[in-house]
Image (cartoon, rainbow, N blue to C red):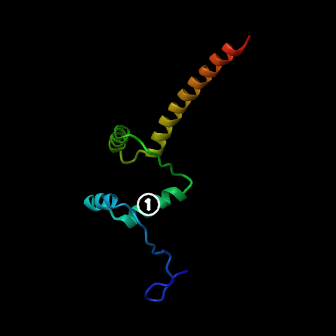
Amino acid sequence: MQKSKRGRKSTTKRINITIPGGYYDQLMSEDIKLSGLISALLRDHLEKHSITIQVSEDTRDLYDRVVSTMKKDEDTDAVVEVGLRGVLQQLIDEKIREFEDLKKRLTP
């Protein structure tokens, strides 16, 4: 474990990274602290109860509107889970129909 400047054991590590200049400029213009962003992304990646996905701008806007209109005491995770389960069930039902159609066409 590293020792801090004062001789105490440090629970954090200092690293150097290289990022494209455009990313740096955008982060600075949005006043985003790179250290905090990376720590949050690492936490999300390493925890087993987190999902990170790339979405379109429209999907992100929709998500932001849904989350921003929720009551403070509402569980965002529970609301999103209900929606995901519904969509997943629809996808499964659609795939089952597609495979049943394929099976009918393949059956002599």
| Front in this rendered view, residue 24 or 30 | 24
**Element marked by disc 1:** helix
In this view, 96 is above or below 7:
above
Residue 26 location, quadrant: bottom left
In this view, 98 is above or below 26:
above
Which residue is drawn at the image coordinates 28% and 60% (left, top)? Answer: 25
Taking the image as shown, residue 105 lies to the left or right of residue 48, namely: right
Tell me the quarter of the image containing the N terminus: bottom right
Taking the image as shown, residue 93 lies to the left or right of residue 82, namely: right
Find residue 80 and report its horizontal and vertical position in percent.
46, 40
Amino acid type for the residue under numbered disc 1: Ala
In this view, 106 is above or below 21:
above
Find residue 87 and report its horizontal and vertical position in percent.
50, 31
In this view, 12 is above or below 88:
below
The residue singled out by tag 1 in the image is 40
Which residue is drawn at the image coordinates 48% and 74% (left, top)? Answer: 13
Which residue is drawn at the image coordinates 70% and 15% (left, top)? Answer: 106
Taking the image as shown, residue 108 lies to the left or right of residue 89, namely: right
Which residue is drawn at the image coordinates 54% and 32% (left, top)? Answer: 88
Residue 63 location, quadrant: top left
| Front in this rendered view, residue 96 or 77 | 96
Find residue 82 and report its horizontal and vertical position in percent.
49, 36
Tell me the quarter of the image containing the C terminus: top right
Considering every residue shown, the one lying at the far right of the view is 108
